[in-house]
Image: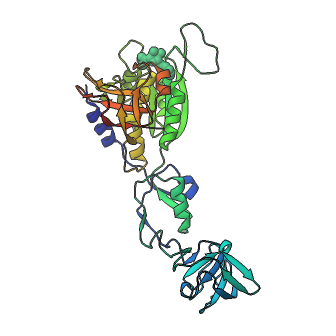
Amino acid sequence: MLSEQEARDRIVGVVSPRPERTVLLLDAVGCFSARNVVARVPLPTFDNSAMDGYAVMASSSGKGARLQVIGEQPAGIDRQLRIAHDQAVRIFTGAPIPAGADAVVMQEDTTREGDQVVLNVDVDPGEFIRRRGCDLAEGQKILERGERIRPVTIALLASQGFADVTIGGHVNVAIVSTGDEVVMPGRKLDQGQIYDSNSTLLEALVKQSGACVTSAEHCPDQRKRLIEAIQRGIKSHILVITGGVSVGEHDLVQATLRSLGAKIEVWRVAIKPGKPFLFGKAGGCAVFGLPGNPVSAFVTFLQFVRPAILKMMGANDLDLPKTPVRLAVDLANDGGRTHYMRGRIENGTFMPIGRQESHALFGLSQSNALLRLAVGGSFKGGAIVDVQTWD
Ligand code: AMP
Ligand code: MG
């Protein structure tokens, strides 16, 4: 049986990044930049007013000063105005600062009298002026190769005049859930049957990772049907199968994959939940066989499938986000496999939640973090540890 790390290294070693592409900004959210990008326009782009008010010379201004208003400077056009001592320019938010001015007095602190304005406050140089480049300098790095593109990232790219961005490759995933007992939600449930929750779970997790789901189908534990489902599934970049990867007579996935010429690279991993896990290659497709138990499917997806998807998409960080928490109770792993304990973080404290068994979907649904307990590892209540999060 492979260790969790060996399994993950093998998987990440086998899959490779898909070809990069250039897309419109909005189509890049959730994807990964294929380039280091630097600012080509400073932010602010020019000195401009942070307020509606009057542009003044601080040295000739102060409480009680009366200034001659020589013109108006709106946003969107540079009127090339220049002020001298005892002069002001009526100015609006975002408008360029006239030559000679070094402060803006906000409208609320002034009294307008014809073509003059009286200041009701003292003025410091620089007040309410947003200086060119004070937020972002030209040439400064704004996006790293492999960094995930978020709504704020595309806003920044837009501010630079970029209409598109070059990102890592597109990844599509086929999902096959197996099991004679498994029935699609919405149908009637007979004795002995259960609803398919894994397909929904996996589809959502694939999308959350940034990949696309090409198909999600159910297949009974029948060799012929499984062959057909696998043949369809391996047309995608990744095929994720759940159930049927264990060692019972009805677990046909591994033998069927082998009969179709797949090369199995990983089979059984020392991880709890999730031991009966399989990874291989069928032609160009990366095939994952996840255990049917929902919590095992969840944990193995996050630890093994997600990093593969991210690598193929060109990400530089394949790990789940980590956050430090205070443990509510003592925890130990006396078993022989790395244990991923489901728990809930509330107010910075992590508490195991629900039954820690691989079928216990309700407990999983209440959790928002995974604590990794290495073999023989233990933590005292009150200790600060890192947990993985996914939401
Ligand atoms: P298996 O890995 O096929 O041996 O299945 C292990 C357990 O997971 C069994 O109790 C199955 O009934 C259950 N299971 C299998 N597939 C699913 C599924 N798609 N949704 C929910 N539970 C499942
Ligand atoms: Mg089964």
| The furthest residue to the left | 376
Q: Quadrant of residue 88?
A: bottom right
**Residue 255, x across and y down, in percent:** 37, 21
Along the line of sight, which residue is nearer the eye, 194 or 128? 128
Asked if residue 246 is positioned above or below residue 312 in the image, the reply reads above
Residue farthest to the right, as pictured: 114
Q: Residue at x 66, y 87 (%)?
A: 67
Label total for image: 0
Q: Is residue 332 left or right of residue 389?
A: left
Residue furthest front as drawn: 64
Above or below, 11 relative to 100: above
Residue 257 position within the rendered picture, expressed as x and y whole percent measured from the top left:
39, 26
Q: Quadrant of residue 280?
A: top left
Q: Nearer the viewer, residue 65 or 256?
A: 65
The residue drawn where x is 54% and y is 29% is 200
Q: Residue at position x 41%, y 28% from top?
A: 343
- Visible in this render: residue 282? no
Question: Relative to the observer, which residue lies in front, 356 or 95?
Answer: 95
Instruction: Report the colour scheme.
Output: rainbow
Q: Is residue 94 left or right of residue 266?
A: right
Q: Is residue 44 left or right of residue 79?
A: left
Image position, residue 261 (x, y; %): 36, 30
Residue at 37% from the left image edge and 28% from the top image edge: 328
